[in-house]
Amino acid sequence: MSKRRVHFASDHAAVELRQALIACAQEAGFEVVDHGPMNAESVDYPDQAQFVADALRAESQALAVLVCGTGIGMSMVANRYQHLRAAAVSDVFSAAATRAHNNANVLCMGARTLGVGLACEILTTFLSTEFEGGRHQRRVDKFPTGSM
Ligand code: RB5
């Protein structure tokens, strides 16, 4: 399978980690789109997540990375969008599992909880793992849509 485009956005808490992760993805051969921010002035993570939501609405095969202080706020926001399946991840096993089993298309990580080395390993694992489909597709198809 050809390598997918990867969209990146963060809030002010994670500018440096986002930049390091972009370099990490490029080194692994992925094409990257950076949605900023370009400096550490305060921005609100829901606004940053919206850039990625818009990008993946137009490019359904793309993947995305959202980084904030913990990765949690970004994942909460991202999962409000029906076309996004976001996972806040802090270990390599979960990075592979959430692609293989949940068909996650957005990886969320925390700049205040992860070092660059581990975050890069999580990222490359996420990007290089394919969804297994089959029984996992059936389960993903059961994700609720709209309000419950
Ligand atoms: C910003 O201070 C912080 O709240 C944000 O980066 C994130 O951790 C939210 O989940």
Image: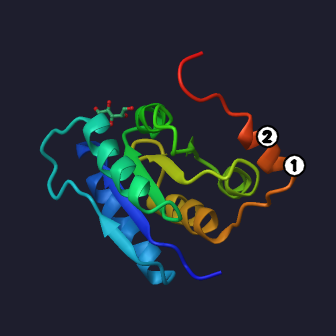
Give the left or right position of residue 29, taking residue 46 as reference.
right
Type of residue at label 1? Arg
Quarter of the image for the C terminus: give it.
top right
Quadrant in the picture for residue 27 = bottom left
Give the left or right position of residue 104, taking residue 17 as reference.
right
Residue 136 is situated, as x and y percent measured from the top left of the image, at 81, 48
Q: Which residue is mark 2?
A: 139
Task: Find the residue positioned furthest to the right.
Answer: 135
Quadrant in the picture for residue 46 = top left
Please give the name of the residue rendered at 34% of the width and 50% of the height, measured from the top-left corner.
54
Residue 123: mark in rendering: none
Ligand 1 location (quadrant): top left
Residue 127 is situated, as x and y percent measured from the top left of the image, at 58, 67
Q: Which residue is mark 1?
A: 135
Residue 125 is situated, as x and y percent measured from the top left of the image, at 63, 66
Foreground of the two, 7 or 109: 7
